[in-house]
């Protein structure tokens, strides 16, 4: 597969100006995509993206790159399918290879209740125009021959949902592509710039205090993922998110053996094979709250045990490295994208384990919301006040195993 030839600098590294029309806090995928679509779709280029560390060094560098849109509820299906359609043309749009591989995603069912829930989700996906299939165990083995489909194991495979258009992409290339396009349009990407406070005037934020000084802001967009609550606490905005470590791992390099992506809730692991050959594995979050990019060893141990149970062929593969990200989780496992009590502050958080797959879609919707002051129809249901009104979007079942 062709690798990109990297120029000396993909984006500019300017000093911050005294003020900007829009200040985006968070230089990960969501912040960069928002900046790109503000410029591309709305002609707004007096924009700063503030990143406390290095560009895309947070969750964007610490995820497992899975992309799919087979969520249960109409609202979730809408935003993830919008994103998937953007993924399908993103390489051409950015003019940068992101190695988007539509190899399909299998969600295994191991119990009769799994089967009922899975078939329900397949039918809901079809009603929303999303590609989805129900496969029996024989068909599962045809899609992924290395899955253990024996009926004489602890959790036999009774079938699976399958989304052929799902797959993976190269996360750092995605960030670099968005950053280059935004920078070319005039957006300032400012690294090593930590937000330390906000200057308010009545119901508005007028400036952002940073480690590089005060920066005036016409509008502020918070796209800080697991660190969102540290920012909203400074603004006095109560946001129902909890931050957890989420660990993943890769194996040593192997020859191509795994043709798709396989997820299992009962055995609790998901496995894909990266472009270079590593097996990429993840599972659930560590149960404690925290902002550390690390976690407990027993979570990693359980991931590997689950992977070997589903894929006996991996029993002798060696662990290469592990890492952790910080995911922000809401009570209904759905994101918050939209307005806050401040007139000119917008929030994008609560994606839990699903943030990477939403990158272009939420960037598109967040840019519309910031540019117009009104939510896009796709992100309109994901309001902060749904936790007051009770109009929840409960995706615990479709989110399932961390991904």
Image (spheres, rainbow, N blue to C red):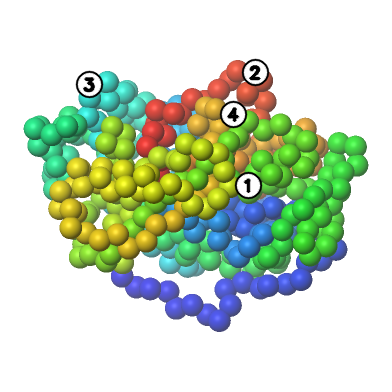
Q: Are marks 4 and 2 in contact (CB under 8 Å)?
A: no
In what element is the residue under mark 3?
helix
Q: Which residue is mark 4?
A: 381
**Marks 2/3: CA distance?**
34 Å
The foreground one among 125 and 171 is 171
Q: Are marks 1 and 4 in contact (CB under 8 Å)?
A: no
The foreground one among 80 and 297 is 297
Q: Residue furthest bottom?
A: 8
The foreground one among 281 and 368 is 281
Q: Which residue is mark 2?
A: 389
In what element is the residue under mark 2?
helix
Residue 277 visible in this rendered orientation of the protein: no
**Mark 2 closeness class: few <14, some 14–19, many ≥20 residues within 10 Å:** few
> Is 309 on the left-hand or right-hand side of 227?
left
Residue 8 percent coordinates (x, y):
55, 81
Kindly identify the residue that appears in the image at 17 percent across and 45 percent down.
Answer: 147
Q: Which residue is mark 1?
A: 227
Name the disc covering residue 112, or none: 3
**Marks 1/3: CA distance?**
39 Å
**Mark 3 closeness class: few <14, some 14–19, many ≥20 residues within 10 Å:** few
**Marks 3/4: CA distance?**
32 Å
Q: Quadrant of residue 46?
A: bottom right
> Which is nearer the N-term, disc 1 or disc 3?
3
> Which is nearer the N-term, disc 2 or disc 1?
1
**Marks 1/4: CA distance?**
23 Å
Q: Are marks 2 and 3 in contact (CB under 8 Å)?
A: no
């Amino acid at each position: 597969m062709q690798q990109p030839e990297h120029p000396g600098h993909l984006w500019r590294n300017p000093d911050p100006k005294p003020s900007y029309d829009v200040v985006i806090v968070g230089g990960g995928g969501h912040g960069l995509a928002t900046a790109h679509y503000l410029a591309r779709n709305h002609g707004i280029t007096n924009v700063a993206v503030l990143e406390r560390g290095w560009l895309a060094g947070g969750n964007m560098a610490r995820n497992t790159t899975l992309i799919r849109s087979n969520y249960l509820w109409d609202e979730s299906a809408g935003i993830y399918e919008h994103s998937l359609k953007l993924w399908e043309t993103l390489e051409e749009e950015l003019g940068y290879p992101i190695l988007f591989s539509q190899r399909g995603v299998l969600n295994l069912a191991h119990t009769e209740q799994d089967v009922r829930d899975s078939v329900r989700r397949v039918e809901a996906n079809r009603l929303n125009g999303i590609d989805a299939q129900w496969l029996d165990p024989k068909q599962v083995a045809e899609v992924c021959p290395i899955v253990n489909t024996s009926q004489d194991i602890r959790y036999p495979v009774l079938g699976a949902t399958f989304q052929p258009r799902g797959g993976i992409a190269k996360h750092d290339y995605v960030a670099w592509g968005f950053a280059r396009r935004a920078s070319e349009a005039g957006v300032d990407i400012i690294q090593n710039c930590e937000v330390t406070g906000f200057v308010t005037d009545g119901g508005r934020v007028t400036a952002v205090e940073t480690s590089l000084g005060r920066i005036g802001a016409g509008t502020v967009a918070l796209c800080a993922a697991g660190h969102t609550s540290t920012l909203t606490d400074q603004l006095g905005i109560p946001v129902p998110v909890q931050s957890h470590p989420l660990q993943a791992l890769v194996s040593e390099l192997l020859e191509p053996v795994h043709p798709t992506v396989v997820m299992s809730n009962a055995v609790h692991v998901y496995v894909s094979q990266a472009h270079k050959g590593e097996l990429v594995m993840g599972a659930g979050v560590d149960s404690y709250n925290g902002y550390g990019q690390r976690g407990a060893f027993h979570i990693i141990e359980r991931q590997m045990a689950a992977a070997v149970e589903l894929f006996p062929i991996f029993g002798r593969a060696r662990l290469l490295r592990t890492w952790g990200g910080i995911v922000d989780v809401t009570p209904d496992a759905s994101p918050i994208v939209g307005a806050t009590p401040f007139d000119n502050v917008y929030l994008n958080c609560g994606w839990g384990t699903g943030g990477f797959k939403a990158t272009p879609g939420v960037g598109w919707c967040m840019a519309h919301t910031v540019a117009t002051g009104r939510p896009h129809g796709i992100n309109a249901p994901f309001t902060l006040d749904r936790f007051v009104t009770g109009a929840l979007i409960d995706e615990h079942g479709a989110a399932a195993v961390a991904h």
